[in-house]
Amino acid sequence: MNIRIIAKIASRIALVLGILAVASCFFSNMLFYGMLCSILGTLISISVIFIRTHYAVPTKWNHISYISVVLCSAPVIYVMILLFVLKHP
């Protein structure tokens, strides 16, 4: 398979995992699965960015992998807000 096709499929998978991670922030009982999607999506996104950089594949500045890294960081930021900002005295 071509590297470009593999990177495109992996980028789409990472984007779906990022969307699931953001959706899990709205349901507190699904936060564990959101963190799992967040970790997997971040790993896939970073590997796609590394592959695209290593093989010098031209990309736009707003590539799907960059967007999915931002989406995958949402549950981590949400948990940090819950722990540090909204803590009970």
Image (tube, rainbow, N blue to C red):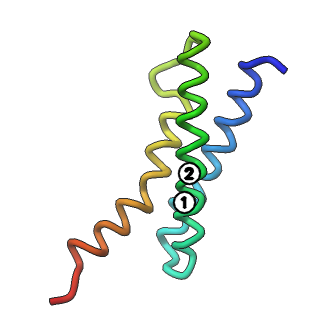
Q: Residues within 10 Å of mark 2 (few under 14, many from 20)?
A: many
The image quadrant that residue 30 belongs to is bottom right
Q: Is residue 65 above or below residue 18?
A: above
> In the rendered view of the protein, which quadrant contains the C terminus?
bottom left
Q: Position of residue 6 (x, y in %)?
A: 75, 27
Identify the residue shown where x is 51% and y is 60%. Answer: 22
Give the answer, above or below, for where 18 lies relative to 55.
Answer: below
Instruction: Answer left or right for 73 relative to 47.
Output: left
- Seen in the picture, residue 82 relative to 63 is either above or below; the reply is below
How many numbered discs?
Answer: 2
Q: Residue at x 69, y 36 (%)?
A: 10
The answer to which quarter of the image holds residue 48 is: top right
Question: Do callouts 2 and 1 mark residues in contact (Cβ within 8 Å)?
Answer: yes
Residue type of the residue flagged with mark 1:
Ala
| Residue positioned most to the right | 1
* Residue identified by numbered label 2: 18
Residue indicated by mark 1: 21
Give me the residue at 56% from left, 38% from top: 45
Instruction: Give the amino acid at mark 2.
Output: Gly
Q: CA distance from mark 2 to mark 1?
A: 5 Å
How dense is the environment of label 1, judged by Cα within 10 Å: few (below 14), some, or many (20 and up)? Answer: many
Q: Name the secondary structure under disc 1.
A: helix
Residue 81 bears which disc, if any?
Answer: none
| Image position, residue 27 (x, y; %) | 52, 77
Image quarter of the N terminus: top right
Q: Position of residue 54 (x, y in %)?
A: 56, 15
Q: Residue furthest bottom?
A: 89
Q: Dot 2 lies on which element? A: helix
The x, y position of residue 76, in whole percent, is 40, 60
